[in-house]
Image (cartoon, coloured by chain):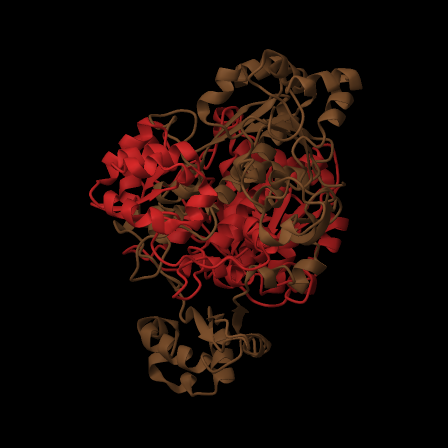
Chain colours: A brown, B red
Amino acid sequence: MSGPLTGVRGIVLTQAWAGTYCTELLAMAGADIIQLEVRKRPDSWRGTYTTPMADAVSKVPTAEHAWNVNALFNSVNLGKRSFTVDLSTPEGLELYRALVPFADIVAENFSPRVMGNLGLSYEELKAIKPDVILASLSAYGHEGPWANVPGIGGTIEPTSGMSALLGYPDGPPMNSGQMYPDAVAGLYGFASLVTALHHRDRTGEGQYVDLSMQEANLANIGDSALQEELLGEQRPRLGNRNLTFAPHGIYEVQPTSEGARQWIALAAEDEVQWSALCAVAGLGWDADARFAGNASRKQHEDDLDRAIAAWAGAEERDALADRVLAAGGLAAPVLDAIEVAEDPVLRARGVMVELDHPEAGRWPQVGAPFHFSRTPVQVERPAPTQGQHSREVFREFLDMSDERYDELVAKNITGEGPPD
Amino acid sequence: MRALTNGAARERRLASVATEASQHAESALHGVQVLDVSSSMAGAWCSRLFADFGADVTVVEAPSGHPLRAHEPRTEDGRAVAAEHALANKRSLALDLDAEPGRELLRDLVTQVDVLVESFAPGTLAGWGLDYDTLKTLHPELVVVSLTPHGQDGAYAALPGNNLTASARSGWAATNGFADQPPLQATQYQSGYCAGVLAYGAAVAALHERGDAGGEGQHLDISEFEVMASTFAPGLLRAQYAGGNIARKEGMDVTGGPVPVADGHFALTLSRAHFYRDAMNVLGLDDLSEDEQLQEGWYRNSHRELWVDRVHTAMAGWSRQDLFDELGVRRVVAGPVFAMNELNENEHLRDRGFWSRADDDLEGPEHSGAPVKLSGSPWRLRYRAPRVGEHTVAILGEYDIEEERVHTLLEAGVLAAEVNELTGSPR
């Protein structure tokens, strides 16, 4: 690792997606992120201990434990180490407290009451490590009337205003295909922790970071909020359209030879891109008065969409995208997950990586989304198996003997898999 | 010589915001100087977060105005909502970078700042002699943040892109929307906001690594396409492990998002066994609550015919608030679909002080507030969005640009300023 956060350590209690993505971004920027897991209540993104394995991964000979080969967990915990501690026992809690002095950062996304109940509130952590930075990511934040209302990505999407904006123009409000609000919260969690680190560099002081997923997501659609405030109107659901530019859509093209439906994104944000599209289509749109200038195209967008759809329907996706792009237009094939994994640019730029996971084997997956010129980042560790580094972590920081470690395993305070 | 001048100018700039500084010295990024020459939401949001956490941010825009100022919708007096939001908390310097004297001026400014945010097509800055390698020799401490649709290198680098194409290429759209309708892009500007916040965090990490004592900056390359791919990471690996793609939703279904209730739509995400049991009890579906097999989430998802339609029917009679309250006391995750006017009045957000007016525009609109609360170095909205060139003269004074040069560039139209700023009086 040579990332800009080399030398920073987080000993974190993050789980599911929002918290783990936040700390994964720190890890991918070079921080040493050591994730605590609780065997009695496994990370929901590992599944329950009885969740079956997915088809393809189940055929990998080393895939032994379903909770270690869950795609969700393994996709958002790159670059980390994992250790297990039973925090419900005094001995386990003492182990965690003994590690806190080694942490610059603690992050967690339990329900708001959990850390306080464990005796791991910010004040309590600060007593152990005066300049510690603690970030709590929760559904609605740690203060306010809804502080204890539970929520996850799928319910924050509607309560943050995001669902009301997402959908087809004539359709209902929708949730995204993934639990996108978690990712948004993770991005802001990452940004806020780095901000707190910078503040500590300057002042020597740690601080408490209270991230409400509802607020982070609402901030990420702040222009829609301001539209309501300035114009007194709810922004409509746009489908694939844009408030300003036309054309702007996703159009069906010829199916694959196996009959799978295919789609292409086509748009024009200026007259150069519009002319390019007209030239490739060769149907005289550039001479059509309805389509002269963006304002007129926007006004006649239904007609425009019909014309483009009728033309694109006979075309082949990748060839059409290539022609429009070569002409200077704006286009992109709509790729599915399996295709994205093969994307040559993601691979060439080191964003799509393949790492050998001890149980799941080797698969393409998305790594670090940032490129630093002088401190380049290189994701080297796959997601850890549950408790993979328990012995290593206790030895490294607490100088623990093998005998003591085995004793803790026998007492179920650490170890792997379902507790006895 | 340069260092002395810069140091003096820097001190003067800090002093020029002295009142503000004494009040908000706790800002995490107090003293950090940022120039934003970008033209996208991604760049604007990146520098907006710098400003929100205390940096001094100048938006360098063409005399014709930042491109976001031309986006719809607009107020009656022609102000674009997106610009009012994303350019807030910054000061405006109107400068024509298509003219060589404009680029010369930018070069003189860049050597005095900590961070340059840009979104030009890759190669543009190099064509002007302002590429990172050149800037680094002039000013080694500089952090340059490049935010583009597809990154600085690779086969897509020169291609245009936006939120639609990032959604299409990243896998995001293919799983979003309904199966019998087209794939659906992320909501407008999402690739911009997400790239902006990631770039902000990464740039602050670069400042952390640089340190204050003459450390080296670096060039940060962020691609909107890659950021959206990053937010799609779970879906991508899920398809790999499953051996096939994940289809879009078949239709409105409680397992995939909001469904109709009496006064709107409501999401009930039954991700844990007790959520399911308690929700079925609240909905009066006791037999479903007690069904042994349906306790397991994976079993419920593969046997939807056993329960989903009945849940929809039961939910249809409830109001959003009653259902949210009943489920909330049982600690079941649930979520009513809220419109913006409802969120603006929301008691919880009000109690937390989320909605915020700019300190210098207390009669102005309320903006969405802190995306995250930092106890020791809080987010703060100090300024409303500037008018084009509102601070041109004042800013150039702070950067020690000679008055004569400023007036020459103003007359040539390379600079633009508001008339009342010609005296150079600070804001």
Is residue B427 shown left or right of residue B154? Answer: left
Quadrant (top left, top right, bottom left, bottom right) of the C terminus of chain A: top right
Is residue B375 shown left or right of residue A168? Answer: right
Looking at the picture, tell me which residue is in the foreground, A115 or B112.
A115
Q: Which residue is drawn at 64% across and 37% down?
A: A26
Position of residue A403 measured from the top left corner of the image (x, y, whole percent): 78, 16
Position of residue B252 measured from the top left corner of the image (x, y, whole percent): 33, 54
- Counting the numbered discs, the total is 0
Is A61 drawn above or below residue B100 in the view shown?
Answer: above
Classify residue B179 by image quadrant.
bottom left
Is residue B126 shown left or right of residue B265? Answer: right
Q: Is residue B217 visible?
A: yes
Name the outermost residue toward the front: B292
Q: Which residue is drawn at 40% across and 24% down?
A: A143
Position of residue B222 measured from the top left corner of the image (x, y, whole percent): 62, 52
Position of residue A409 measured from the top left corner of the image (x, y, whole percent): 69, 21
Quadrant (top left, top right, bottom left, bottom right) of the N terminus of chain A: top right
Q: Is residue A377 visible?
A: no
Q: Which residue is drawn at 36% across and 30% down?
A: B353
Looking at the picture, tell me which residue is in the foreground, B287 or A144.
B287
